[in-house]
Image (cartoon, rainbow, N blue to C red):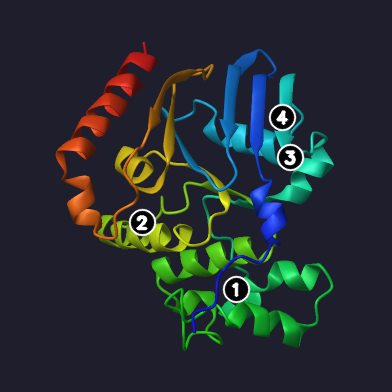
Amino acid sequence: MQTRLRESSPDAVAGATVAVSGLAHSFGELEVIDEIDLEVAPGEVVAIVGPSGCGKTTLLELIAGLRPPEEGTISVAGGTEPTGRLDRCAYMPQRDLLLPWLSAVDNAGLALRLAGTSRGDARGRAGAHFERLGLAGFEGTRPDQLSGGMRQRVAFLRTLMAGRPVLLLDEPFASLDAITRAEMQTWLAGVLGPDRHTVLLVTHDVEEALYLADRVLVLSSRPARVADRIDIESPRAADRAAAVTSPEFAGLKERALRSLMEGRR
């Protein structure tokens, strides 16, 4: 029997709406985000694409409560204060940040240990997911002996084990080569299918965004505004190659790239 990855309660996941209204933020005189509105429905995967430096990572940090916004309101599963939002979000940064002195299973269970779970229980709960994530047999392996794709899977599992209803994924596959990245996209699509967490995914890869998400937001150059909102009507296909070469997918990709170009002006 396969073990489902959802560590948060079904009720928490079901209520995990993210709502952002009139969000604006600057660093000194540098305007980064200007008047962004977005809403992520419970169980929805929304991808955010935009030019480098337009404020995508800052947007995730604001939603997670890691920074206070200068203007606008943010709500995550009903929590509006920074500490409340932080309690409801699990944030996976661009780098895997695995601790080199811990094994794969201990890295995956780190959030549980920090919450007071015993080492044995944390290993048991994290280790129960290793087979499904393609990590069986590597529980005791240190990070420097894992491939890039395996490291990202361990980091993703660590994010899930935090037990938060909202996942914030910041370029999770940016450091991988093209072949491994495509494999990881297929893997993540398979994980997100049955385990309907509410997800915000930041990526530079338009193809990745369109393949993984239910909806794609295209941001303009800094200060970031929403240049386009693209709904993905077809469900994620198990066969990535067939999905990304379909005429429908090609049309959506052309639209997203055109919106990106127009947003740079």
Callouts 4 and 2 close, C-beta under 8 Å? no
Alpha carbon distance from label 3 to label 4: 12 Å
Q: Does 151 sit above or below residue 88?
A: below
Alpha carbon distance from label 1 to label 2: 25 Å
Secondary structure, mark 1, is loop
Q: Nearer the viewer, mark 1 or mark 2?
A: 2
Secondary structure, mark 4, is strand
Alpha carbon distance from label 4 to label 1: 35 Å
Residue 128, picture quadrant: bottom right
Q: Position of residue 160 (x, y in %)?
A: 61, 62
The disc label shown at residue 76, or none: none
| Residue toward you, 71 or 40 | 40
> At 49% from the left edge and 79% from the top edge, which residue is drawn?
2
User: Badge 3 is on which residue?
Assistant: 66
The disc label shown at residue 185, or none: 2
Q: Position of residue 121 (x, y in %)?
A: 74, 84
The disc label shown at residue 100, or none: 1
Secondary structure, mark 2, is helix
User: Tag 2 or tag 4, which sits nearer the N-term?
Assistant: 4
User: Badge 4 is on which residue?
Assistant: 74
Q: Position of residue 196 (x, y in %)?
A: 53, 55
Q: Amino acid at mark 2?
A: Gln
| Residue toward you, 128 or 261 | 128
User: Tag 4 or tag 3, which sits nearer the N-term?
Assistant: 3
